Amino acid sequence: MKKIIFKYVLLIVVTFAASIFIYEYIQKSTAVDTEYDVLSYQKDLENQHLANTNYTLDNPNVLLNFYGNSPLTALVVFETKDLTSVTLTVKGKDGAADITHTFVPNKVHILPIYGLYPDYDNKVVITASGTSKEITIKTGALPDDFTKATYVSDMELEDGKFYFTTPEDKGYTAAYDENGEVRWYLTGDYKWDIQRLNNGHIIIGSDKLVSQPYYSIGLVEMDLLGKIYYEYNIPGGYHHNMIEFDNGNLLIASNGNNNTREDYIVEIDRATGNIVKEIDLNKILGGNHEGNWFGITSLAYDAPTNSLTVSGYHNDMIINIDYASTEINWIISKHDLGKFNKYKLDGDNLPDSPETVTLINSDEFVVTSLDGNKRALLTYKLDRVNKTFDITNKITLDDNENAYIDKTDEGYLVTQGNNILRVNDSAERLLSINSTLYNTKLMPLYANDIYTGVQGTRLGVLGETPTTSNHLLIWAKEDESIIDKYNLNFYKDVYGLRFAGTFSKDDDVQLILDNVLSKKTYDIQIPDSDEEKIVTSKYVNEDEIKGKYYIFIRINGTIYKLNKYVIFY
């Protein structure tokens, strides 16, 4: 009898404890916020606003900033009875040149308008079959923190070209005309190099980070309307530079799944997003390195020799490898490389923190490098037979800030700090911006791209986010005040869970996800900074994790229960 009573009492206690557990652990928790899928959002917009094209030239449908991320663009929609070529003209203000573009013949016209002025009543002339219609498009003001021109030279740009710039850290990806007027920009935090692909689209680093301090989850291919046609997700993320091969594939500076950074290069199949080639400089150069020892800043492919030249900012090195075999052809470096010295070319003026390598031909290239206390453009001429090089030209810049170059028909376009320079025999300042730039390209607004309403495609995978040692949660504190104290923020999107917070550089932080049957702990890397409080973020990728997880955070040895959960699909 006593045993029966004991069993009933035990059952009641267990049930009561389970009820408390369910309430405390589950029912009190709320789901993190969810961000919309941008590709689905784009398609919803198109279905809602572009299904009806029954407008006329005299009364067109004008959709300003249609995708919500490119405020100085618009779509104009109308139909014509016959196949008609339409010409759009954005009128320049204060005597500036007009922007004019003629589209291929069609009956249904869904046409992008690029190059609108901010905070202005833009006059746009639409001409079809000899008939013209002028419309007015009123745009909003630039954001308060926008990067504006502080100096503009009187040099005219090549016909129809604009300065397309990307920020070094904070700022906007934007295009400026020769008068310093902003004529296009994106509202997302897009970074690194901006390039125009052979199909006319632009490609740029994603506005989402896969890991600190600045590694994008991959690349985004879009038009200037801000419509994303492809997202290319990369397991090690993307930084600094990429190349489009003639076959369309993309060669990308990335990171490997090891303890090093910025020493890994991948080629991805443009059609599938799959990685078809991997180049691990850590492995090629001995395999015994740690951290950001190399620091890839640029890639330069030479088709005649099927070789790849890579600049290493942190290792003061320029290395050339055979692309097919990944064997080393030659190295230029000021350091003793041990058994790799046999690959070194001899010469004076060895690279010091090199940044951009731009090929002239298979045996000649220009590199930006420190030269004393200033940056310089150094032209290297190689003698492969005698394993030497000569510096055939040197142009010294005014200071030692990082400098990135792009070859144009009229010399080299150099981005240094907040200045854009044109360099031939000397450096001439073209434009200055009130924030630090990463790189600049001279490109037209209109290219050979054709707007289509196709669904955007997401390719590639990010892979499983690395975990660390787990901790017992039984003594976790329930203190939601730390959410405000550390500015903790969580949201779920199609890639996974994004965590952000503000910490001191000495804080030891881990993110813990627990679903009772499984526990995953992730180190939070706090970027190096002189700031007292440092904004930090972390992505937990959707790959290799499924189900409902409750969120904890461990800060300096104390674990906190946040009463939040996330569901991975």
Image (tube, rainbow, N blue to C red):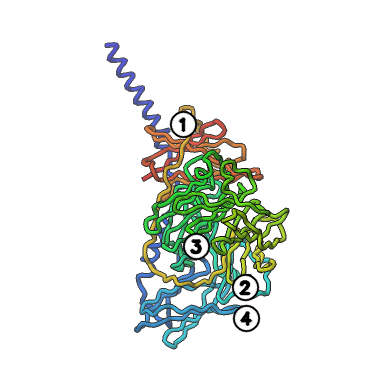
Residue topped by disc 3? 69
Residue topped by disc 4? 95
Q: CA distance from mark 1 to mark 3?
A: 40 Å
Q: Earlier in the sequence, mark 4 or mark 2?
A: 4
Disc 3 to disc 4: CB gap under 8 Å: no
The amino acid at mark 1 is Asn
Label 4 neighbour load within 10 Å: few <14, some 14-19, many 20+: few
Where residue 359 appears, x then y in whole percent? 56, 62
Residue topped by disc 2? 178
Where residue 184 appears, x then y in whole percent? 54, 68
The amino acid at mark 4 is Gly
User: Going 39% across and 76% down the picture, which residue do you hit?
Assistant: 109
Q: Nearer the viewer, residue 547 or 562?
A: 547
> In which quadrant is the N terminus drawn?
top left
Q: Nearer the viewer, residue 438 or 27?
A: 438
Q: Earlier in the sequence, mark 3 or mark 4?
A: 3
Disc 4 to disc 2: CB gap under 8 Å: no
Disc 1 to disc 2: CB gap under 8 Å: no
Mark in the foreground, 2 or 3: 2
| In the rendered image, the vertical position of residue 215 relative to residue 516, given as above or below | below
Mark in the foreground, 1 or 3: 1
User: Going 56% across and 48% down the picture, which residue do you hit?
Assistant: 343
Q: CA distance from mark 4 to mark 1?
A: 66 Å
Residue topped by disc 1? 470
